[in-house]
Image (cartoon, rainbow, N blue to C red):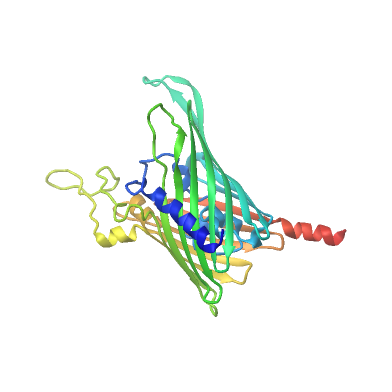
């Protein structure tokens, strides 16, 4: 299969799948919402989307499998995020490259909601229960000159108290990278799939499908890269909504009723946009900043927004491993902390071979 046949094949799968998802919604109307989280520190620091960030970082392929390259051969990635009230999530991955075949990856994304107290309708304590969700991933990418195409298959297991569910999904992606202009363009269709086993019989729920397009530009003579990602394009102009129960809303002095939020077409467009920038000091250190407008709209208070929607972080590479930290503002006064590690196994193997 040549490059044109391969691209045509991926596009055929993509548009055939989109037909069933064009009316899909976000924000709690589907299941397996943990798939939308970003345990990776670099992705978190860039606002939650980094599909056009082309770096030698195997953790980035969790969001865009087309970013898998031969330079990631034998990289091991570990990520963890400290959410609120003891909730923890993470992602573990490994990549392997085979010349003339492509680059493969395998990973596990997870979230542990912790232990809950189980009570009766009258408040009597009956015991405790736990809740957790897992996603086993297998990815592949192939590069054809400036174009790379990739995909990953996801097997999902969710256990919430006595309720369990199984699901299957796939991500399809394509990335165009021009090394001379330092320009990247990516298209990703994430979480195309379905439930195999539902929590309750006959209650089939949709998955958090997300169609994204991203671009990034790095400057040849300045240590900066800027990125823009448009997300949830399967639902154009339909992300914002009025929430009459949102805390902090002003009330009408005569009726006492909450005054609904107002937004215009410009706000609707911005709700699809994620902006980010990086200061790249050589190949071993970066500082990243990001802004997610939808997150700020949904989570800020009426009187103040604080750092809601903003994110920042940094990463440092040493000889054989890389460490990164990201911090994301979810609502006023509370942020999440993300930490990531990459181990470059080839550096250890090279040292061992030299010693022998």
Count all numbered tags in the image, as a single digit: 0
- Asked whether residue 48 is in view, the answer is no
Question: Which x, y percent locates residue 3?
Answer: 54, 63
Quadrant of the drawing holding the C terminus: bottom right
Name which residue lies at 41% across and 27% down.
200
Residue 209 pos. (x, y %) = 41, 48
Q: Residue furthest toward the left?
A: 254
Figure quadrant of residue 12: bottom left
Q: Residue furthest right?
A: 356
Using the image, determine if residue 104 lies above or below residue 70: above
Would you place residue 162 above or below residue 23 in this image? above
**Left or right: where 183 falls relative to 121:** right
Q: Is residue 56 left or right of residue 198?
A: right
State the residue at coordinates (20%, 49%). Answer: 259
Q: Is residue 67 visible?
A: yes
Q: Foreground residue, 262 or 36?
A: 36
- Quarter of the image for the N terminus: give it: bottom right
- Expressed as whole percent of the image width and height from the top left, the position of residue 306 reads 38, 57
Q: Nearer the viewer, residue 201 or 150?
A: 150
At 71% across and 60% down in the image, what residue appears? 320
Residue 246: horizontal and vertical position, in percent?
29, 45
In the image, is residue 38 above or below residue 218?
above
Residue 201, image quadrant: top left
């Amino acid at each position: 299969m040549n490059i044109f046949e391969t691209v045509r094949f991926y596009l055929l799968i993509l548009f055939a799948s989109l037909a069933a998802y064009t009316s899909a919604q976000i924000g709690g109307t589907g299941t397996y919402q943990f798939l939308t989280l970003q345990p990776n520190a670099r992705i978190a620091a860039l606002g939650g989307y980094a599909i056009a960030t082309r770096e030698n970082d195997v953790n980035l392929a969790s969001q865009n499998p087309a970013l898998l390259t031969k330079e990631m051969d034998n990289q091991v990635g570990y990520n963890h995020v400290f959410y609120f009230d003891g909730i923890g999530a993470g992602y573990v991955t490994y990549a392997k490259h085979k010349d003339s075949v492509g680059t493969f990856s395998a990973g596990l994304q997870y979230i542990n909601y912790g232990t809950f107290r189980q009570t009766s309708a009258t408040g009597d304590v009956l015991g405790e229960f736990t809740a957790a969700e897992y996603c086993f991933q297998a990815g592949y990418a192939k590069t054809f000159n400036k174009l790379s195409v990739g995909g990953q298959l996801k097997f999902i297991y969710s256990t919430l108290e006595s309720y369990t569910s199984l699901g299957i999904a796939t991500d399809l992606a394509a990335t165009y990278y021009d090394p001379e202009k330092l320009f990247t363009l990516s298209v990703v269709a994430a979480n195309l799939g379905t439930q195999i086993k539902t929590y309750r019989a006959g209650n089939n729920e949709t998955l958090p499908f997300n169609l994204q397009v991203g671009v990034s530009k790095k400057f040849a003579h300045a240590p900066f890269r800027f990125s823009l990602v448009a997300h949830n394009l399967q639902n154009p102009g339909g992300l914002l909504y009025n929430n009459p129960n949102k805390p902090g809303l002003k009330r009408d002095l005569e009726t006492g009723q909450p005054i609904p939020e107002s937004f215009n077409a410009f706000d609707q467009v911005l709700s699809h946009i994620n902006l980010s920038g990086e200061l790249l000091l050589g190949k071993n250190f970066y500082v990243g900043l990001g802004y997610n407008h939808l997150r700020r709209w949904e989570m800020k208070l009426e009187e103040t927004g604080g750092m809601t929607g903003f994110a920042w972080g940094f990463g440092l590479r040493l000889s054989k491993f890389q460490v990164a930290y990201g911090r994301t503002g979810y609502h006023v006064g509370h942020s999440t902390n993300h930490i990531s590690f990459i181990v470059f196994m080839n550096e250890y193997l090279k040292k061992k071979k030299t010693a022998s």
